[in-house]
Amino acid sequence: MTTVTFRTNTLAWRDINVGDEVTPLEIPLTTTVIVAGAIASRDFMPVHHDREFANKQGSPNVFMNILTTNGLCVRFLTDWAGPEAMVTKLAIRLGVPAFPNDPLRFTGTVTGTSEGVGGEGFVDIAFKGTNSLGDHVSGTATLSLLEDRVDA
Amino acid sequence: MTDETADKAKFRKKLDALTGQPTGGSGKPTVAPDPVNQPMIRHWAHALDDMNPVYLDPEFAAKSRFGGIVSPPVMLQTWTMPAPKLEGIAERGGAPVEIAKNPSAFIEEAGFTGIVATNSEFEIERYPRLGDVISVTQVFEDISDEKKTALGTGHFITWVSTYTDQNGEVLGRQRFRVFRFKATS
């Protein structure tokens, strides 16, 4: 069994300011990553795992499916904010495809913070994931962060 | 020329008629084939190298705001995918199973056989928990006029999915858009 060290701390929303940079995340994309993500998201569309089929559809290679893109956006956000950051909104627009061996780099900025009720705060983020071809994904997200947690 | 204009007008009317229609034809919700479960969450977490302890560490998750293991929120779209029939999946544009009464089949039949996803907008009420049985209903929202992009000529098709749990509580909503096209190459 592989032992994984988990990140356990989550950011406090009051410590976050408009203009703060979300920690960049670089994903070394390979065919394996693209195929694993497609199958794990239960997307068996051949463009994501069959190169010949992708060619016939006009693409030079297999490319990442949108569910995996969505999943990596979530990972980008929680890798920065912490495991208890809850994604309440995630809106993405796909641009260029994400092909194998073209690293995907996520960057983002905090565009707003606001207080909710009961110690909950919201953080708005604008972000994108880019590769050598341009913007693969651009979008916005809102995270909910709790100030006072009830310890079980 | 007049025939082509008339055909285009007829096609446009058929596209307009889809707005508000369920994408599956019957309007009945699609129920996830399996409840939210740890093995599938682990499969996703490792494929995406997203080692968030709320997905994988029961002890941490129990003490967290989520009260227990949860799945990534965007897996809402995965949980409700029917178990696939691989044969013919390419011809169905990636749809896991044949839709008995597909109201948008005429778009594909008109030659727009290519398909790519272009947009997704999620609003999450709560994350899926182990054991949740999730259902989804999907309704067409909009179909664009014919557009030309780098991939080819086609229509942008948007639908809205509403995800509910076993008690009918809404877990989240997703606006999803695909581009159905005739390939240029």
Image (cartoon, rainbow, N blue to C red):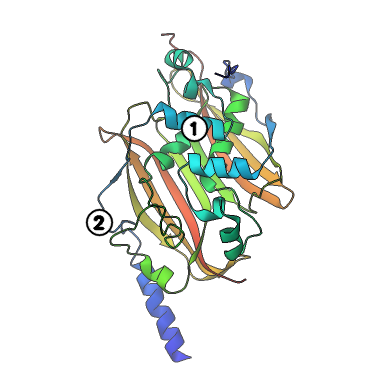
Element marked by disc 2: loop
Label number found at residue B26? 2
Q: Position of residue B94 (x, y in %)?
A: 45, 55
Element marked by disc 1: helix
Q: Nearer the viewer, residue B90 or A7?
A: B90
Looking at the rendering, in which quadrant would you find the N terminus of chain A?
top right
Q: Nearer the viewer, residue B12 or B111?
A: B111
Relative placement, left or right, of B41 versus B23 is right
Marked residue chain, label 1: B
Q: Nearer the viewer, residue A81 or B43?
A: B43
From this viewpoint, is residue B102 visible?
A: yes
- The vertical placement of B115 against A105, above or below, is below
- The vertical placement of B64 against A85, above or below, is above
Give, as a three-letter code, the residue at label 2. Answer: Ser
Q: Position of residue B68 (x, y in %)?
A: 40, 19
Marked residue chain, label 2: B
From this viewpoint, is residue A87 visible?
A: no
Q: Position of residue A63 (x, y in %)?
A: 60, 51
Give, as a three-letter code, the residue at label 1. Answer: His
Label number found at residue B43? 1
The residue sitting at 67% across, 41% down in the picture is A29
